Amino acid sequence: MQYYVQYNKLIDLVETSSNTIDDILSKCLAYKDEIQSLLDSKGGPTRNGFLLASLCQALNCSIADFTLYKIEEGDESNDIGVHQKIFALPLDYDISHFR
């Protein structure tokens, strides 16, 4: 599954949580570089559910509050090989493909 981080919604959540971007980054140290990259590019796609869960925990919100999603062929498979192939595919940067 791919998620598309909506920059404006993420920034709104940061601001309403009485945190700064630096506060959030310090709470998500394991994903600090990837989060910073998403912020620098004004949002975008990711398959990293752990990154999103970390942001949700820091912001006390749900993934749906700042992302759109796209189901990919093979997402429901239990085969690790299928998931490795999915993760090797390029990310989709067209927001119109997400809901």
Image (cartoon, rainbow, N blue to C red):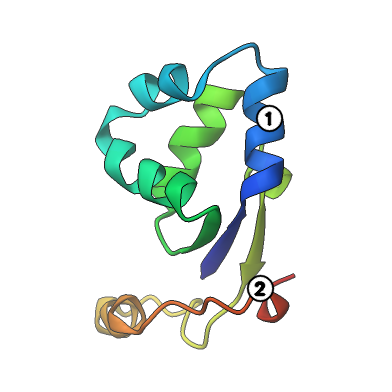
Tags 1 and 2 touching, CB below 8 Å:
no
x, y (%) of residue 6? 65, 53
- Residue 85 has which mark? none
Helix, strand or loop at disc 2? helix
Q: Residue furthest top?
A: 18
Mark 2 Cα within 10 Å, few/some/many (few <14, many 20+)?
A: some
Residue 58 appears left or right of 82: right
Vertical comparison of 17 with 63: above or below: above
Mark 1 Cα within 10 Å, few/some/many (few <14, many 20+)?
A: some
Residues at marks 1 and 2, CA–CA distance in whole angstroms: 20 Å
Vertical comparison of 7 with 26: above or below: below
Q: Residue at x 26, y 78 (%)?
A: 84
x, y (%) of residue 43? 54, 54
Q: Which residue is mark 1?
A: 13
Q: Quadrant of residue 35?
A: top left
Q: Quadrant of residue 81?
A: bottom left
Residue 95 appears left or right of 20: right
Vertical comparison of 9 with 86: above or below: above
x, y (%) of residue 34? 33, 48
Q: Residue at x 64, y 11 (%)?
A: 18
x, y (%) of residue 27? 38, 21
Q: Which residue is mark 2?
A: 95
Residue 4 appears left or right of 90: right
**Which image quarter is the C terminus in?**
bottom right
Helix, strand or loop at disc 1? helix
Would you say residue 77 is visible in this rendering? yes
The amino acid type of the residue labelled 2 equals: Ile
The amino acid type of the residue labelled 1 equals: Leu
Looking at the image, is mark 1 or mark 2 earlier in the sequence? 1
